Structure formats: C-alpha cells, structure tokens
Image: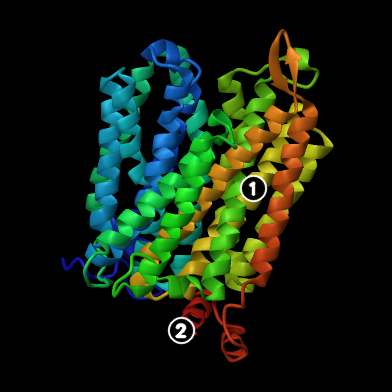
Amino acid sequence: MDPATPISPPPGAPDAARPLRDRLTIPVLASGGILMAVMQTVVVPLLPDLPRLTGASAATVSWMVTATLLAGAVLTPVLGRAGDMYGKRRVLVAALVLMTVGSVLCALSSDIRVLIAARALQGAAASVVPLSISILRDELPPQRRGSAVALMSSTVGIGAALGLPLAALVVQYADWHTMFWLTSALGALGVAATWWAVKESPVREPGRFDTLGSLGIAAGLVCLLLGVSQGGTWGWDSARVLGLFGAAVVVLTLWCLQQLHAERPLVDLRLVSRPRVGLSHVAALLTGFAFYANSLVTAQLVQAPKATGYGLGLSIVATGLCLLPGGVTMLLFSPLSARISAARGPRITLALGAAVIACGYAVRIADSRDLWMIILGATVVATGTTLAYSALPTLILRAVPAAQTASANGVNVLMRTIGQAVSSAAVAAVLVHHAGPLDGIPVPTLHGYLLAFAMAGAIALAACAAALSIPSDAPSGATRRTRGATPGARDEAMEGA
C-alpha cells in the first residue's frame, strides 16, 4: 500500500469499513502522547529517595528533571522541523525510540551520571505531541480532525495525572528499577504500534536542514532555561544565573538575525510575527505557566504536615489520586473543546479555557483546607487546561502552511515548556519567601500557597486577554460561507481562508 494513501476512506464511510490500522491510528498516537507525559512524571515520586539510592546529593539528583526539561525544549523545534522535511512518522518513531532507550538505561543503572544522561534522552519525547498533531492534520478529513487534535493535545495532562499515582505505587511496593522496566516495555510497545498503525505523511518541505540555527536555538534555550530552573538554588543575583541570562539574550538575538537571513530557517520568524501565530504562542506560554502551578502547588499542599494547621499529611500515592480526577476530566472534555472550536472558533475556546483556569484558582483561594474543595479546584483548573490546550494546535494548524505544521506546533509546545519552567521558578520563589519554621525546618505558609494561586490565576486572565486579541479565524466573507455548514465543511473553509 502506498504510504501516501490517506488513512480515511471516502467521507461518510462508517468506521467499521476502515482497515484496522486506520482505525487504530488515533488511539496509537494518543497513547504515545500519554506515554510521553508518564515518562516525564514518573521520576517525581523518586526524587526524595534518590540521594540515598544513588549516593548523590539532592542538587545533583534534581538534574534528572532539569536534563529532561532542557533536552525537550531544545529538541522539540528541531525534531519538528526535521519531521516537516524528512517525514513526520520517521522522526516520531525516532523520538519514541530515544525515549525507550533512556528508560532502559534508567532500569539498568543506579549511577547518577547514567541516569541524568538517560533522562536527557527521554526529553526527545517532548516532540511526540506536535509531530502527532501534524500527522493528524495531513491524514484526517476535516470532520474528524478537530476532535482528534483536541484529544492529542490533552494527552499531556492525562499522562501527567496517570503517571504520578502509578509511579508512587511502584515506588512504594517494588524496587524503583521496576518502574523503568515497566515504562521500557510500554515504550517498546509504543514504537511497534506507531510503526505499524501510522502511515508516513506525504506532506514535506524539502531543503537543507538549518544546522546553524539548530545549534543557536539549543545554546540560547539551554542558557535561558538553566538560569530559570537553577535560579532558586544558585541565587537569582548570582554571577552564574545573571551570566546565563545575559548569554541567552545575546545568543537568541544573534539566532533571530540568522533565522531572518537563512534561506530555509529552522523557525520561520516572519510567520511567527503574524498576529494569529505570535499571539497563539504568547497564549501558550501564559497557559503553560497557569496550568503547571496547579499540580505543583497541589502536590505540596496536601502533603504538608498537619501540624502546619492547613496541611493534610497525605502520602505520595494519595496525592497522585487527588490529581487523578483532573486527568479523567481532560479525557472527557477534549471532545467538547473540539465542538466549541468548530462552532465558535478556537480562539474563543482558548479564551474560555483560560477563564475557567482562573475560576479554578478562585476556588483554591476560597478554600484550600478541605480535601474535596482542593480536588474540586484542581479539577476545574484541569478542565480549563483541556479547553485551552486543545484549542492551541487548532489555531496553529489554521494559521500556517501545511508543510510547516510540525515545526510551528513544536514552537508552540516549546512556549508551553518555557511557561512551565518559569512557573516552577516563580512558585518556588513565592513559597520560599513566605515560609515559617516547623520543628526547625522552613515550611511554606498557607498565605504563600494562596499567593501562588492568585499569581497563577492572574496569568490565566492574561492568557484569556491574549486569546481574545488573536484575529478572528476568517474574514467576514468566509464566515458567511460557513454559516450553517457542518463542522467539517466549516473547518475546511476556515483553513482555505
């Protein structure tokens, strides 16, 4: 069978008429996104015990998270561009292979140097979602595309919600290497399923790969994110952190100039300068900040000792279960996001999602002592995140040429990653500044947590404003042509506009 053959039969054909491979394409891609998020999350419950298990310091152990963040941020736009040029399925399979190899290395070793290097390999999996979304755009008919893209984008939150309790259970009842053997098996299964069920997209953008641009963005992002992630440890006014930020400004400025003059740039900055694309990236950064504060602060709050007067003293497993309803909600609400985008446009869905996130933080500020209110607030934030994250790739798909969808979505995911990194640093700074002694150990106060919620809620409102500032999807003529049309026909008309 020609790999360029679309995965769907003629419009109107029932699902039962599709070959098994075609019917499994969306579930296989979605499971890859969930597995990627699980891989990023499973190490979190291990962090308190890893210094004892590896003989390394706590600061060194933290690099198991930092290495994945840096590698993911660097590789996402690079692999997205490679997918546009050399084949999205080929690059997607390569990213899943790197993720699986990293998991096998973690399962085989207790050497912290090997573990950090392995976690850096797993960072390649951050490109799974943008590559998968681009495949769905190339291969699916418009009437199926919206819901599939919404589901794919939601897999990040679903996998994160599943990964924490899963890892906590394994760590509590089995050897910690067992967790990585389990993820290795799941990764190998994901590679095989992707190779079998996903056809190679025929949409390509030929040309020479921008190696200089790749090295430039890698150096600039490493300086930026390393400074952000280590600022709390090294000191925000330390020479190392200020030097990293200065280097990031210089390198990224030179990189922008190089991209503007490159014949085949890694990132088309002229495309990014269009309001529909640039404002979508700004909204992605702000939404990433607001979303990440939810799981980060909730996990610390419910595990705080009861002696603080507000903490619930929950175990890691119980903490994971508190976040699980949010993951289930993300799975259930992704089809709703697609319907709202089809009816009102993705920018309205994005704005609505950001507003719902802000409402969730208002619930957290109103009551962060009762467990059911904590779960309710966290679930409302997860619901808003589903709407926002599901709308972002649709905005990008409608605003960029088909041959640049993987790289453009890669940049959008990169902006979310930067937002999450800044959120982690900002929340840590707030909680450290508002801490009181408990048995001689500084512990964040309830006021500190409430300030963190207020900060995240304000950022969510800023994301809502950015979404409403995005120009409408189509000129008035296109809007009139699509009025009364089916969602699929409406999507097609919008993209043509």
Q: Is residue 390 above or below residue 422?
A: below
Residue located 45% across and 49% down the image: 247
User: Along the line of sight, which residue is nearer the eye, 449 or 211?
Assistant: 211
Please give left or right for residue 50 compared with residue 475 in the image: left
First reached walking from the N terminus: tag 2 or tag 1: 1
Rendering quarter of residue 70: top left
Across and down, in percent, residue 257 comes to: 40, 68
Dot 1 falls on a residue whose secondary structure is helix
Rendering quarter of residue 305: top right
Is residue 174 at least partly visible in the picture? yes
Binning the other alpha carbons within 10 Å of mark 1 as few (below 14), some (14 to 19) or many (20 upward) gives many
Q: Which residue is mark 2?
A: 496
Across and down, in percent, residue 67 comes to: 39, 36
Residue located 49% across and 63% down the image: 393
Q: Is residue 244 above or below residue 60?
A: below
Type of residue at label 1? Ala
Please give left or right for residue 415 compared with residue 23 in the image: right
Q: Which residue is mark 1?
A: 290
Residue located 47% across and 44% down the image: 244
Q: Which mark is residue 454?
A: none
Is residue 79 at least partly visible in the picture? no
Q: Is residue 306 above or below residue 245?
A: above
Dot 2 falls on a residue whose secondary structure is helix
Across and down, in percent, residue 103 comes to: 31, 31
Marks 2/1 in contact by CB < 8 Å: the verdict is: no
Seen from this angle, which residue lies furthest right?
366
Residue located 48% across and 68% down the image: 396
Which quadrant: the N terminus?
bottom left
